[in-house]
Image: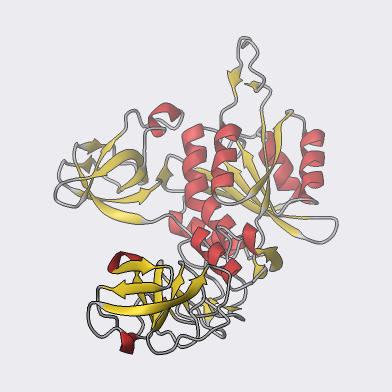
Amino acid sequence: MISLSEASEIVIGGCSSLAPIEVDCRQMSGRVVAQDVVAKESVPPFANTAVDGFAVRAQDVDKPGVELEVLGVIGAGHVAAYQIGAGQSARIMTGASMPRGADAVVMIEDATVLSATRVRCNKPAKVGDAVREVGEDVRAGDVVFKAGEVINSAGIGVLAGINARKVSSYPRLRVAMLSTGDELVIDGSTLRPGQIRESNLTMLASMIEDTGCEIINLGIVDDDEERLEAALREVATRCDAIVTSGGVGQGDFDIVKIVLSRIAEMHWMQMAIKPAKPFAFGKLKTSDSRVVPIFGLPGNPVSSMISFELLARPALRKMMGHTVDLRRPTVRAIVDAPMKRKQDGKVHFMRVFGRFGEDGRLHVRDTGPQGSHQLAATAQANGLAFVPDGQGLAAGAEVEVMLLG
């Protein structure tokens, strides 16, 4: 058996990011920037007011009760043709361009409208009051996003605001997924003796989408070597990675293992962890000389989920340009109830539910049965506790937890 860190070196180290492409800024959420984004425009591009009120010269409003002439009304999207002189002002709406001569805005709440052409300012004004200056948010020439940074929803707004309509970005992966098994039922029909309902692909589809990838779902492929090989070779021509479920153990008749061993360069691993001990990683060369990584997950649903989280997910993120935070965050937590296990030379990944206590620390307890086939208890978990080899952990002990939500 090998350690999880050794397996990570093989899997994550064996994957490279795809070539960057130009992406519409509106499609950048969750993507990684491939080249620095430099602002060509300032935000805001002109001085404007942050409030509804009256644009004034601060020197004219040096005390409460000053009355000013109102030259007109300036709405957002309009520019005044006049200049504010001594004793003058202009009614101005939020976002409107500051008129020439004005250097402050008196809020409407701090003014008394005497007539259409006269206003009393009830508070003194200072230069810059309620004025958004040119480039206060972003200045032309600023590097707003560095290569390697991830764009979120606010970032998309920034890109739109500086008119960065296209951004050099790493593409979303197209991930093909399939499983084998004549015993699997996917259409909701009545189960015959020996049959079970498919759950792994349904679960993995959600996990792959959550990783930011697009899915090519081949569903269940018959337990037939020729059909499986044909399916793998064909889908490799139109995807960036392949995820399989089942058939990666030490059995001599696992069809996935037989076919992949023949057509791809594979690493068949037995890791010192529980669950998810078996895992396969390899590379399939396509007819057009591309190399497509293959992630072979075990068939038991909990093992499949955990091996995806520990190995496949960070590798897929690396392929999409992520260089930091490949894995989910981990924190030290307090064990609220004993976590019992047997010594077997492996690290156990126990499914736990955690919440923050009054002490500000994360507290966790297991979610129930921990068998690799018992997915229902896993559905209640928001973390994986790394329980080291031994007899387990007593209540009050500390444990490292990977946060899942």
Q: On the rendered structure, is 396 left or right of 12?
A: left
Q: On the rendered structure, is 110 left or right of 149?
A: left
Tell me residue 318's x, y (percent). 57, 62
Colour scheme in use: secondary structure
Residue 289 vertical placement versus 256 (above, below): below
Q: On the rendered structure, is 106 left or right of 135?
A: left
- Quadrant for residue 62, please give it: bottom left
Residue found at x 35% / y 55%: 330
Tell me residue 380's x, y (percent). 37, 33
Question: 322 or 73, which lies in front?
Answer: 73
Name of the residue lying farthest toward the right: 287
Question: 307 or 161, which lies in front?
Answer: 161
Residue found at x 14% / y 51%: 359
Residue found at x 48% / y 48%: 309
Tell me residue 192's x, y (percent). 63, 10
Residue 351 vertical placement versus 74 (above, below): above
Residue 99 vertical placement versus 308 (above, below): below
Question: 5 or 305, which lies in front?
Answer: 305
Tell me residue 369's x, y (percent). 34, 28
Q: Is residue 249 visible?
A: no
Q: On the rendered structure, is 99 left or right of 52?
A: right
Residue found at x 42% / y 48%: 272
- Quadrant for residue 260, please give it: top right
Quarter of the C terminus within the rendering: top left
Counting labels gives 0
Q: Is residue 39 visible?
A: yes
Question: 355 or 267, which lies in front?
Answer: 355
